[in-house]
Amino acid sequence: MSNPAQRANKLFVQTFGTTADDLYLAPGRVNLIGEHTDYNDGFVLPAAINFHTIIAVKRREDDTFRAVSDAFSGDIKTWQFGQEGQPEEQGSWINYLKGFTSALATSGLPAKGLDLAVVGNVPLGAGLSSSAALEIAFGTAVNDCSQLRLSPLAVAQMAQRGENQYVGCACGIMDQMISALGEQDHALLIDCEDLDSEPVPIPESLSLIIINSNVQRGLVESEYNLRREQCEAVANHFGVESLRHVSLGQLEAAKAQLDETAYKRARHVLTENRRTQQASQALASNDIARLSELMAQSHQSMRDDFEITVPAIDQLVEMIDKVIGNQGGVRMTGGGFGGCVVALVDHALTDAVVETVEANYAKATGLEATVYLCSASDGATRLDEDLY
Ligand code: GLA
C-alpha cells in the first residue's frame, strides 16, 4: 500500500481497533542557501518538499496521548499531558512529540489527549528534517484538535522550544518554520531575527534535485552545538546579542584579536547572510547564473570557513557542478557532516546530473547515492477527506 494516508489510517485501525477522526500532514525541507545562519538571527532560504509525515488521530476526552509509528514498530508510547518525564534515548521519535506537549504545558497552554498513528516518507537521518516534519504534523494536530488557535508560526516556535528544552538539541527555527509555512512552487526567505518571511517563486524552468550522499552522519549534534557556541563567542566579543549585529568590516578590523577558527566561523555566517539575500533576488528574477555563483560560494564557505562538509559531499558537489556549469546551482544542504546535496538546475540537465552521479559517485567514494526529484510544497495542513 503506497498511499501514506491509507497507511496511516490502516495503522491506526490495527493499533487502536477503531477508525481515526482526522489526518494531518507536514513536509520535510531542503535549504537552498543560508546554512547555520538561523540561530545567528540571520537569513535562510528553504523550501518544503513533497516528502511528508502523516498522522492519523482520534480525539480523547482525557489528557492521555497514545502514539505508534510504522517506522519504529514497537510498543504504543503513552504519556499524560504535562507529565512527559525524562526523554527516551537520544534520537527516539517519541521525544519530538513529548517535546511539543511539554513546551505547551510549560507555556501554560492546555491540550486534550489524542490517539495517533504516524507514517511518512521523509528519509530518516538524511538531513531533510524528518524530525521537524514529525513535530509540525503533531503540533498542527494538537493545535487543531484542542482548538488552541495558534498560528502556524506559533506552532513552529512551540516545536522549536520543545526540541531545545526537552529533546536537548540547540537547533534554530528554520526547519520547523518551513514545515509549517512552506508554499507550493516557492522557497521562503526567512529573516530569523524578527521571523518575517516572504515566499520567493522558484522559476518553472528549474528542477529541484536532492542527492543523498548516504555518508553515515557522525558527531552531528556535538559539532552543531560547538559551531553555535563558536558563533556566540564572537557575538560576545563584540558585545552584541547575535552575529546579525556584526558587519563584515567590523569582523575584519577585529581579526587580530580573534582566534583564527572563531574568525572563520563568523566570516561564514556574515557572508552567508549576504549570499542568501542575493540568492533570493536572483531566484525571483530568474538569474540562474548568479544563483549558480552564490550556491558555489556558499559551498566553499561551508567547506573552508565553517568546516561542516566531508570529502564525499565535496566530490558529489564537484561532479554535479562540472555538468551544470552556470545553468544551475549545487551545494551541500542542512546541518552538515554528511546528509544531502541540493541542485537547482535547468530541466534539460536533470538526466545529465543523475547520470554523472550514477557514473562517478560510487567509483569515487565507495558509497551509493540516492537521488530524489522533488518539488516545493505547501506546509502543514489537515488533509481534506476527499484527498485520501
Ligand atoms: C539543522 C537545524 C537548523 C539549521 C540547520 C543548518 O537543520 O535544525 O535549525 O541550523 O541545521 O542551517
Image (spheres, rainbow, N blue to C red):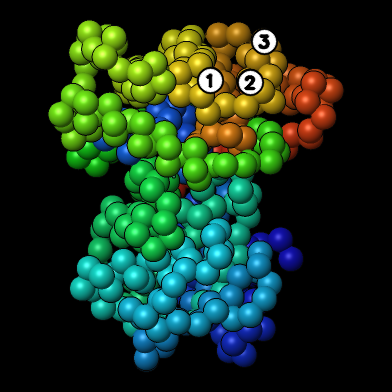
The quarter of the displayed image where residue 382 is located:
bottom left
Residue 61 at x, y = what percent? 37, 91
Q: Give the residue type that dot 3 points to.
A: Lys
**Relative to 67, residue 185 above or below:** above
Quarter of the figure with the N terminus: bottom right
Residue 314, label in figure: 2
Q: Is there CB contact under 8 Å for labels 2 and 1? A: yes
Residue at image position (24%, 42%) is 195
The label number, if any, that marks residue 303 in the structure image: 1
For the question of whether residue 195 can be seen, the reply is yes
Q: For this rendering, which residue is in front, 304 or 234? A: 234
Left or right: 76 with respect to 360? left
Residues tagged 3 and 1 counted as in contact (Cβ below 8 A):
no
Labels 3 and 2: the sequence-earlier one: 2
Badge 3 residue CB within 8 Å of ligand 1 = no
Q: Residues within 10 Å of mark 1 (few under 14, many from 20)?
A: some
Question: Where residue 216 appears, x then y in whole percent?
Answer: 68, 41
